[in-house]
Image: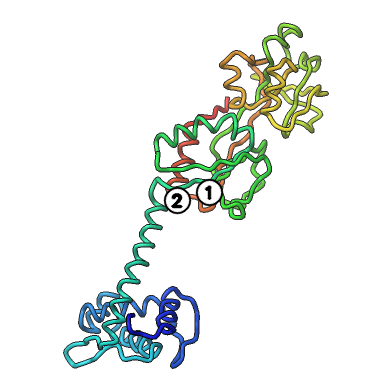
């Protein structure tokens, strides 16, 4: 737009990105980018008919778009003859600048599409503190090794965070029943079985429970959603058995309860993935291994579900496969 008044250059560029403004003389340009693309097509192809065919419009529609531009700019952009259409001097200068600007916009749009479809970019996710500290780190490292161009930002938070308000791509939620918050698309990743555990030294001192009734005589550690329960229901092959509980220790989260149990504080109900490392290392032993306390459900919530970025969909699929959560 060299040679054009500075005010008019700024006004044209603002309108090209749909920032409304009133331009004297004439009416504001309402067609926006479509009018600019139609003008460029006419200049490049030399006729209104060819431009209309390319853009899937009528010849009259293309003509009206160009006329709207000319009225908006207060300048004649095209010289029309029965056989051809050529740009005027002003039209030629306007075409050069408009063509370059449209190319930049197209490049930006393609970059955005590739980012959405490709396995690269940043994933912001949140999970309960227990999962964020005990379960997810090794899984997320494996995921990033598979997709090294994906970056991760993990927030451990037990209170549910709104995905939009906190600019999150993915939220993992654990629920003892159906998930109450379904304001975002959710996928059930699997179930997490709750079992009883205790430290070997504690069991050597207090003795191993042999039946659900024996648990009532043990020191109990309860955490998270189990803190408020007055009874625990144990499920076995032959049915269920409910026992009253009077916990010796209450903890805000399962990770803290696990530490209490490792220190010999008592018997603790824990989700299997939380207890897995401690059991593998021998710091905890299963108590009443033929009994369990039911299943908690693990959900993945995203903003766009199946229409979300490929990197987010890939992480959800990876977690579903990698967790291999058992129901029995």
| Residue at position x 67%, y 40% in the image | 158
Circle 2 — which element? loop
Count of numbered badges drawn on the protein: 2
Q: CA distance from mark 1 to mark 2?
A: 9 Å
Residue 24, placed above or below residue 37: below
Circle 1 — which element? loop
Badge 1 density bin: few <14, some 14–19, many ≥20, Cα 10 Å: many
In the rendered structure, the answer to whether residue 17 lies left or right of residue 213 reads left
The colour scheme used here is rainbow
Task: Tell me the tag on residue 309.
Answer: 2
Task: Tell me the tag on residue 169.
Answer: 1
Q: Quadrant of residue 147?
A: top left
Badge 2 density bin: few <14, some 14–19, many ≥20, Cα 10 Å: many
Nearer the observer, 174 or 73: 73
Find residue 187 and report its horizontal and vertical position in percent: 54, 43
Q: Quadrant of residue 297?
A: top right
Residue 243, placed above or below residue 140: above
| Residue at position x 22%, y 80% in the image | 50
Nearer the observer, 13 or 34: 13
Q: Quadrant of residue 63?
A: bottom left
Nearer the observer, 70 or 302: 70
Residue 160, placed above or below residue 64: above
| Residue at position x 54%, y 33% in the image | 136
Find residue 266 and report its horizontal and vertical position in percent: 75, 17
């Amino acid at each position: 737009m060299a040679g054009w008044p500075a005010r008019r250059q700024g006004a044209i560029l603002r309108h090209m990105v749909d920032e409304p403004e009133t331009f004297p003389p004439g009416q504001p340009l309402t067609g926006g980018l479509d009018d600019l693309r139609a003008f460029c097509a006419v200049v490049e192809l030399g006729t209104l008919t060819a431009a209309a065919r390319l853009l899937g419009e009528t010849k009259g529609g293309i003509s009206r778009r160009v006329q709207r531009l000319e009225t908006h700019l207060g300048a004649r952009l095209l010289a029309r003859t029965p056989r051809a259409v050529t740009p005027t001097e002003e039209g030629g200068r306007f075409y050069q600048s408009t063509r370059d600007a449209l190319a930049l916009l197209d490049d930006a749009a393609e970059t955005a599409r590739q980012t959405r479809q490709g396995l690269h970019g940043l994933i912001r996710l949140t999970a309960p503190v227990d999962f964020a500290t005990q379960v997810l780190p090794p899984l997320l490292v494996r995921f990033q090794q598979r997709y090294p161009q994906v970056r991760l930002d993990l927030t451990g938070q037990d209170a549910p965070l709104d995905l939009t308000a906190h600019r999150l791509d993915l939220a993992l939620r654990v629920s003892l029943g159906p998930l109450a918050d379904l304001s975002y698309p959710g996928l059930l990743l699997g179930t997490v079985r709750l079992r009883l555990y205790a430290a070997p030294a504690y069991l050597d001192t207090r003795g191993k429970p042999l039946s659900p009734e024996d648990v009532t005589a043990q020191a109990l550690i309860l955490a998270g959603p189990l803190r408020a329960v007055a009874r625990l229901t144990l499920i076995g092959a032959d049915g269920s058995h409910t026992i009253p509980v009077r916990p010796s220790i209450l903890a805000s989260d399962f990770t803290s309860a696990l530490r209490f149990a490792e220190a010999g504080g008592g018997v603790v109900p824990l989700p299997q993935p939380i207890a897995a490392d401690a059991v593998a290392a021998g710091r905890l032993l299963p108590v009443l291994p033929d009994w369990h306390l039911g299943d908690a459900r693990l959900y993945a919530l995203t903003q766009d579900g199946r229409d979300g970025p490929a990197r987010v969909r890939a992480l959800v699929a990876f977690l579903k496969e990698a967790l291999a959560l058992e129901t029995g």
